[in-house]
Image: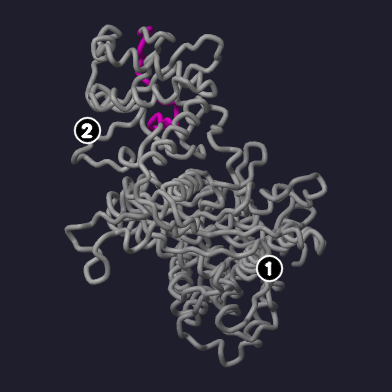
Amino acid sequence: MSKTYDACKDIVGISDAECNQKRMLLPLYHTLKESNITIWLSQNGQFIDAEIDKAKKNEDKIMICIPCTEESETRTSKGARKFPHPLFDQIKYLTSDIYLENLAKWVTFLDDKYEHIIAYKALNAVYEYMKRQLLKFDLSSCGIKSSDKLSIRFCVNIDGHKEDRLWMMPEIWEAWTNYLLHEDIEKQKNLDVCYISGNKKSAIALNHPKSINRVAGNAKLISGNDEKNFTFRGRFIEPLQAVTVSFEASQKAHQALRWLISKQSCYRCDTQAIIAWAIDFNTETIDFFDDSYGIYESKKNTDSDKLIKAEGITYIDYSDNLHKVLYGYGNKEKLKQHTRQIAILATDAASDKSGRLSVTYYKELSENRYIESIEHWHNTCKWYQPFIKEKGKLTLLDYFIGAPSVHRVTKAVLGNKRKNQDASYDKQQKILREQLIHCIFDGDKIPIYMMKAAVNRASNPFSFEKPKKKNYAERWMDWEEVICAACALTKKYYYDYKKEDFDVVPEVKRKERNYQFGRLLALADDIESTARYKQGKTKDDARATNAIRYMTVFSQRPFRTWNMLFTQMLNPYIQQLNGAGWHLNIISEIMELLGDQFEDDTPLDGRYLLGFFAQRQALRQKNNNQKDGGKSNESKE
């Protein structure tokens, strides 16, 4: 983490276009703090105005970058008044004598230093104002009811300086860093070996930053203050006997980690955060949790890279195109340029939000190896994946071929949350996400429970149906996502354990009972949907066919259910299709291929979904390719 901070030092303190400091790489010896009230001062410290801070849309709180000390950043309710932050803080701390004393020392240090003239003027204005002790009176005069827990930030109008927001001024950050380093040198306390930098004479941190992952509250990565529960009993008497980390190295590591976790590319689940980054000035890397289409689209840079568009072409193999993009279209010279080191890290609060923040997974590997791992995952776990596309006023369902996103895998295995706060679900989701990291980067085999759970859920389509929706895409999209993810997991499972691969097109010669029964189910589904189309039903007819209605029973008793479907349910539709000769020929071929296996009525495993979906998609594509838009039997029978 320290290397990452040093590599990215040029972007320290740079916020986004909206001046949002939540996702900013903070300067050393600074932290994020909530702000409630802004106070404007003149250069000589005269009060001008005060206003309650209002967060913008989609923001819960206004967070600002504030200077802090080792003690103030890690303070707790007990004895907290002794450790106010140096500049911005809650009213109860700003009105204390200790705050004024500390601010006076800082101002005095800057008094004769020309390089800090702007910071001196700004801080001196705040000091002159605060020592008059008129804060609560001035807030009241502006119609603001003061409370000790409200946090204050200052703006100072400095002659000849455009920026008046002290929390946005690099001059303030630099002035505080130099002052704090000066104080540490003067004190010369706790000098020891830093286990991170290797420096033998470093100022050692006694306390380390908290709130690294704001969702995890005050949870810390490094802590040694658990005296009551005897953390060190039997090994060490004091925390520093276990490990020593310098204040500077601790700050760099925690600031970099806080910044990475705040980025949108971080994957979060409750208190868990999973990040991947390059240990380089450019930390951005491939979002391995995305699906093949998402990664492919994000990595396209030029017009020549834009090989295809999923919106215009059906059934594109994005895992294959992803391979070309990641490896520079086979250019070995481009491949050699991937020299960065990539780190993957997962953290989680060990117990509650005020406890410890654990590193549950960490791995460093070369960018080549990182890319190879992602490419291998997307090639061995690929299947049809659905997406919604808009065509005029119509909402249509289309597909690309690739690996599903981790979010979609989670949905297929665990389903949706029963409620917003579901601790049991969150716990299972965290375990699943971390197991997938091991599968992608450590070569672990896909856990069998994932495949079985997804297959069981996919075999119950009516649990996903939205009956009030008349359009197929809107009515069945949830089920399409689950069944496609289940197929991908099944394909991956048999590749991992049996070294067996399945194609996304029907394998008509595969002598495998589960797979071929799946094909039979797809043919039964197509016979009914074709007949209904021939009756004049439109695409808005999104009712499930009998094959889909009996899918759950079919997966448990395939032979018995098939006989019922074929002899009773499908008979009227076969007659409407003039005998459905084209379909029946394929059914006969499958029955002949299976031989004695055809009468086996034992439950089917996940391979039946592969046969079902591959056959169904082949039939769909065939029907869609008819020049007149009709069904295959209209031209063949």
Instruction: Find out whether residue 194 is within the magenta segment.
Output: no
Task: Please state the horizontal and vertical placement of residue 627, each as a whole percent of the image.
Answer: 80, 54
Residue in the foreground of this view, choosing between 269 and 117: 117
Task: Please state the horizontal and vertical placement of residue 274, each as a whole percent of the image.
Answer: 48, 55
Residue at x-position 40% and y-position 48%? 203
Q: In the picture, residue 348 is in which quadrant?
A: bottom left
Report the residue that reaches farthest toward the left: 228
Quick check: 628 above or below 21?
A: below
Read off the residue under disc 1: 578
Task: Please state the horizontal and vertical placement of residue 235, each as a whole percent of the image.
Answer: 27, 70
Residue at x-position 68% and y-position 53%? 296
Residue at x-position 45% and y-position 81%? 603
Left or right: 185 with respect to 371?
left
Question: Which disc is residue 256 wearing?
Answer: none
| Residue 94 shows in this picture | yes
Q: Secondary structure at mark 1?
A: loop
What is the quadrant of the C terminus in the image? Answer: bottom right
- The figure's colour scheme reads one colour
Quick check: 140 above or below 339?
A: above
Dot 2: few (<14), some (14–19), or many (≥20) neighbours within 10 Å?
some
Q: Amino acid at mark 1?
A: Asn
Instruction: Find out whether residue 56 is within the magenta segment.
Output: yes
Q: Amino acid at mark 2?
A: Arg
Read off the residue under disc 2: 81
Residue in the foreground of this view, choosing between 460 and 234: 234
Left or right: 605 with respect to 130?
right
Residue at x-position 24% and y-position 18%? 146
Task: Please state the horizontal and vertical placement of residue 594, each as a whole percent of the image.
Answer: 61, 87
Quick check: 514 above or below 621?
A: below
Q: Which residues are magenta?
A: 47-66
